[in-house]
Image (cartoon, rainbow, N blue to C red):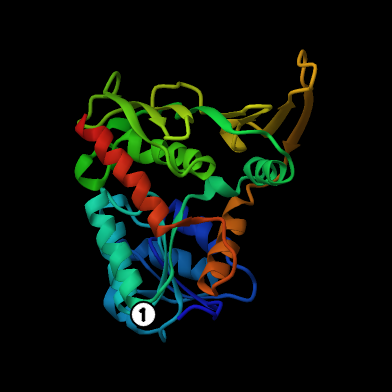
Amino acid sequence: MSGVRPDRVLLVGCGFIGRKRAASLPTDVELVGVHDLFTERAASLAADFGTRSFDDLGEFLRSTPVGALVVVATTHDSLASTALQAIDAGHHVLVEKPGARNDEEFALVVAAAEARGVELRVGYNHRFHPSFVKLRELISDLDTGPLMNIRARYGHGGRLGYESEWRADPARGGGELLDQGSHLIDLSRTFDPDLHLAFAELATQFWDMPAEDNAWLALRSFSGTFAWLHATWTEWKNLFAFEVTWRTAKAEITGLGGSYGPDRLVWHEMLPEMGPPRTQEWNFAGPDRSWDLEMSDVLNACAGLESVGASGSDALAVLRIIEEARRT
């Protein structure tokens, strides 16, 4: 079914992320309908975007000819089952990260997409923040030598009632490792896809809940890369920091915009005589365009064009690392 860029999108899940996905659609793509278990929420989004809301998911998916793009923006416990229904109906799928609650659930989705011949992409939108886009440009043009290490932190500031939210419920796919930690693993794998788990420590240090609020992971690859990642719900001030070091250069990315602070990339390049490096800095102001860029990338992938977003196999590799961490 590849080779045709979808011009119709169906949205399942009309919460905060669903609205971001609806707003990210290019002008030449039609949002033909939306669905949510909370029918009032679906009706509200439909009214705001000039489309229809559907109460019955099966009818909704069958109402559009095959080859549309279904965006699945539900809670984690419904991601895999909804994606499978969309694939069975013959549609391409963009499913929100992490794709499922665990690797066993998501392996079924990957296999179904391959068997049906439709495109499966996973919403790891941080790949499309301008600092990471610029970093990919830099390392494609420069000889930095081999990758040596990655150090990253991602943390929520916390809010009252956090322990009662769906992310804190393991049955619904909760836990900080699956929430923010999955982003860190995915971003690390964009620099070295052979990274695998070397060490994990999951802890519930503050919130009274059955899922972890802190996760520390060490990843390594056979080429010698080492990554140290910390995802936390006890940061007390929203934080994103991602550092990558090669033999002759280093990148420092901080902020994601909004409450995480300005999106900023600092590039240090070692000189032949060593000493203080040559340093450049980019600060990216303005609205968060990662959702727009990712949506265009997904539509291109459906058409068989070049894509830098997360594939089904990328997301499955992330979930396998998470499941191994949970077992340690």
Q: Quick one: 199 or 289, which is closer to the camera?
A: 199
Q: Quick one: 256 or 19, which is closer to the camera?
A: 256
Q: Which residue is mark 1?
A: 90
In terms of secondary structure, where does tag 1 sit? loop
Figure quadrant of residue 96? bottom left
Figure quadrant of residue 66? bottom left
Q: Quick one: 234 or 91, which is closer to the camera?
A: 91
Kindly tell me whether residue 307 is visible in this rendering: yes
Q: Is residue 109 left or right of residue 230?
A: left
Figure quadrant of residue 296? bottom right
Location of the C terminus by quadrant is: top left
Where residue 264 appears, as percent x and y from the top left, is 68, 33
Q: Which residue is rendered at x = 40% and y = 31% of the image?
A: 219
Q: Which residue is rendered at x = 47% and y = 34% of the image?
A: 223
Kindly tell me whether residue 86 is visible in this rendering: no
Q: Amino acid at mark 1?
A: Gly
Where residue 23 appears, as percent x and y from the top left, is 57, 61
Where residue 115 appears, as percent x and y from the top left, is 31, 74
Q: Which residue is rendered at x = 39% and y = 59% of the image?
A: 312
